[in-house]
Image (cartoon, rainbow, N blue to C red):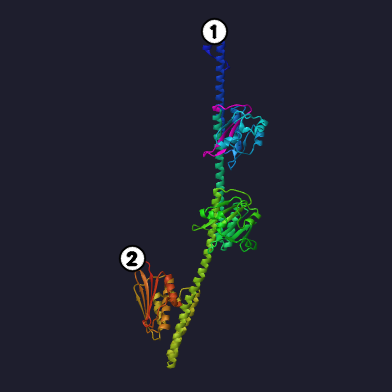
């Protein structure tokens, strides 16, 4: 055929001239000529359709890449197949999230039909699209009027003039049914392999568009969720940093949880450390933070075993959030009536875990049925862990405060004992000595003892004031430990029958203020005890600095005593506690009639010279 549409066939023209007188031959040649023309036209049509399909697919691919709306892409796909196959009606149906129903996607040339079939259950024995989705394979209906799968839908087909339909499932890359792509016809007909190939090709293109849109939506949701997580966790951490009241911290947590999940309300249950029961503690309802002390809440069962709600037990076992999809149809449990009265339908129970053990839970309540993505459950778990951290910090803070109170009380008791009590002992000794000197009319000795008693009393008063303020002993501010110990011993024993000696061994090393104070108080206590109870004639003190340890030995030749750990006095206990606080060892050896030896040893840091060896 030339450019003017004239068929050119030289061999055929020659044959016609040679066989002009053969009528039968001419007819045969004319038929062959017509057949060739039709084949050529079909070839041209096929080429044009291929070109149109190629260009159409290219345009649709561009729309997908640009992120255009799915509705526009679906419409283009239907119109493209209608253009390629004249007389066809393209229809796209989409699967719902439950995987059980098809709903409208696109049908630009058949909107009335689409409006009427929007939303129906899939069934392998019903219709064409429905059967294709249910069977996950192409379904061909060549004549709707006689096909048994259309038995209950023939009136629908007749209203819209449908006689044939060919549907192919739209499958995701993972093989999940996303919907169906179908062609309907107004006359009975069967598809050619080319029809099926093109329909399958466009179904794959639609699947790609759907998955790309879902991925983009998931990414956007993940970004939004990540921002929400950062905001929520920041708010909770700010509350932890700023608040000291555990109730206020929990209020911040519950308000964050409620806002983040757009929930109706939420509550916190904690495991009782003694009984093991789950005890209701807090809730946020109607925007108001409430505790278990509120009368209406206290009237409801305030505690229950975790097994009372089966999903709780499972939640603690797997240490992951559990969804109670519809409490209206679940077995009864405490609080269920109250929740139903508030309109609660769905609950997300989130375990609060510390050290691998479930110590509580947050119940997030909703007045509508809903599902939760993995990211949402992870956020809920992170917030629950923050809440548990807040509660644990509050507990530890309370314990720490209690320990601090006890520690300070013990410190004050030791300091009062080591300053005022020991000072009074020294005063009493000097007063007794003054009385004895007075009886002998030794006026100078009396004056000396009274002066010594006054000095000891004033020193004791100053030290008591410094102890109350947790200050270092004044003597140690001016002299080193060895000098202060020697001076103390001489001051307490001067003018008495006790002969005291002090010996310093080794090269003195710098000690921490706390260690110096503890050694001073131990020496003071040991000497006072000896003078008060043992009535010794000798009291020897040795302070020895070694390479790796510091040792203080205090020995008297007094009456001694039988050791009984259960009846140890406060002084001995205080000395032991002071040695322990320095990481050292305390020992005492005594027996009736054999005097007493007290030893305190603490480790010293390795000297620079030793480190170089």
Instruction: Decide: few, some or many residues near mark 2? Use Cα within 10 Å; few <14, some 14-19, many ≥20.
Output: few
Evaluate if marks 2 and 1 touch, with contact meaning CB atoms under 8 Å apart: no
Element type where label 2 sits in the image: helix
Q: Please identify the quarter of the rendering in which residue 293 is found.
A: bottom right
Residue that numbered label 1 is attached to: 17
Asked if residue 534 is among those painted magenta in the image, a careful observer would answer: no
Image quarter (top left, top right, bottom left or bottom right) of the C terminus: bottom left
Picture layout, residue 179 above or below residue 38: below
Camera-side residue: 45 or 300? Answer: 300
Residue that numbered label 2 is attached to: 610
List x then y, in percent, for residue 82. 60, 29
List x then y, in percent, for residue 428. 46, 85
Q: Nearer the viewer, mark 2 or mark 1?
A: 1
Image quarter (top left, top right, bottom left or bottom right) of the N terminus: top right
Camera-side residue: 151 or 314? Answer: 151
Camera-side residue: 546 or 192? Answer: 192
**Residue at (50% x, 71% y) in the render:** 406
**Residue at (34% x, 69% y) in the render:** 547
Element type where label 1 sits in the image: helix
Q: Which residues are magenta?
A: 166-194
Q: Is residue 135 visible?
A: yes
Camera-side residue: 316 or 427? Answer: 316
> In the displayed structure, does residue 602 sit left or right of residue 178?
left
**Residue at (55% x, 24% y) in the render:** 46
């Amino acid at each position: 055929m030339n450019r003017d549409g004239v068929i050119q066939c030289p061999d055929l023209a020659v044959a016609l001239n040679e066989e002009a007188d053969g009528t039968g031959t001419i007819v045969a040649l004319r038929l062959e000529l017509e057949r060739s023309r039709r084949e050529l036209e079909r070839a041209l049509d096929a080429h044009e359709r291929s070109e149109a399909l190629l260009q159409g697919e290219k345009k649709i691919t561009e729309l997908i890449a640009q992120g255009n709306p799915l509705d526009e892409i679906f419409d283009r796909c239907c119109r493209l197949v209608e253009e390629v196959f004249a007389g066809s009606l393209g229809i796209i149906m989409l699967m719902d999230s439950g995987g059980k129903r098809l709903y409208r996607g696109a049908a630009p040339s058949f909107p009335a039909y689409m409006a009427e079939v929007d939303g129906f259950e899939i069934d392998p024995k019903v219709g064409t699209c429905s059967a294709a989705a249910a069977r996950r394979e192409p379904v061909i209906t060549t004549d709707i009027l006689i096909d048994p799968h259309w038995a209950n839908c023939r009136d629908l087909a007749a209203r819209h003039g449908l006689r044939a339909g060919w549907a192919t499932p739209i499958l995701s890359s993972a093989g999940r049914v996303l919907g169906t792509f179908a062609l309907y016809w107004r006359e009975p007909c069967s598809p050619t392999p080319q029809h099926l190939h093109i329909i399958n090709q466009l179904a794959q293109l639609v699947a790609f568009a759907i998955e790309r849109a879902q991925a983009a939506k998931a990414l956007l949701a993940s970004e939004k969720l990540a921002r929400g997580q950062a905001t929520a966790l920041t708010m909770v951490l700010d509350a932890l940093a700023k608040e000291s009241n555990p109730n206020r911290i929990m209020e911040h947590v519950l308000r964050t949880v409620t806002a983040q999940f757009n929930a109706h309300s939420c509550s916190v249950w904690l495991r009782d450390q003694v009984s093991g029961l789950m005890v209701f503690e807090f809730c946020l309802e109607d925007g108001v933070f409430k505790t278990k002390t509120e009368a209406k809440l206290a009237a409801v069962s305030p505690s229950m075993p975790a097994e009372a709600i089966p999903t709780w037990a499972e939640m603690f076992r797997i240490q992951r959030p559990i969804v109670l999809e519809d409490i209206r149809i679940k077995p009864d449990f405490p609080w269920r009536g109250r929740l139903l009265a508030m309109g609660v339908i769905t609950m997300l129970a989130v375990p609060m875990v510390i050290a691998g053990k479930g110590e509580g839970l947050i119940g997030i309540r909703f007045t509508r049925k809903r599902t939760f993505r993995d990211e949402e459950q992870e956020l809920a778990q992170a917030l629950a862990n923050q809440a548990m951290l807040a509660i644990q910090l509050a507990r530890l803070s309370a314990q720490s405060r209690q320990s601090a109170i006890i520690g300070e009380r013990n410190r004050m008791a030791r300091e009062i004992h080591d300053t005022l009590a020991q000072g009074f002992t020294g005063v009493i000794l000097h007063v007794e000595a003054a009385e004895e000197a007075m009886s002998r009319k030794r006026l100078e000795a009396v004056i000396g003892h009274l002066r010594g008693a006054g000095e000891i009393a004033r020193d004791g008063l100053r030290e008591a004031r410094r102890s109350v303020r947790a200050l270092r002993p004044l003597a140690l501010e001016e002299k080193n430990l060895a000098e202060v110990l020697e001076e103390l011993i001489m001051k307490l024993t001067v003018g008495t029958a006790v002969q005291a000696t002090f010996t310093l061994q080794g090269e003195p090393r710098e000690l921490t203020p706390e260690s110096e104070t503890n050694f001073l108080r131990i020496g003071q206590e040991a000497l006072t005890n000896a003078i008060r109870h043992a009535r010794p004639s000798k009291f020897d003190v040795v302070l020895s600095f070694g390479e790796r340890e510091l040792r203080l030995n205090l020995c008297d030749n007094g009456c001694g005593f039988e050791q009984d750990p259960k009846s140890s006095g406060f002084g001995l206990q205080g000395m032991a506690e002071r040695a322990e606080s320095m990481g050292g060892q305390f020992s005492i050896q005594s027996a009736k009639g054999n005097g007493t030896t007290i030893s305190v040893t603490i480790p010293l840091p390795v000297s620079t010279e030793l480190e170089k060896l």
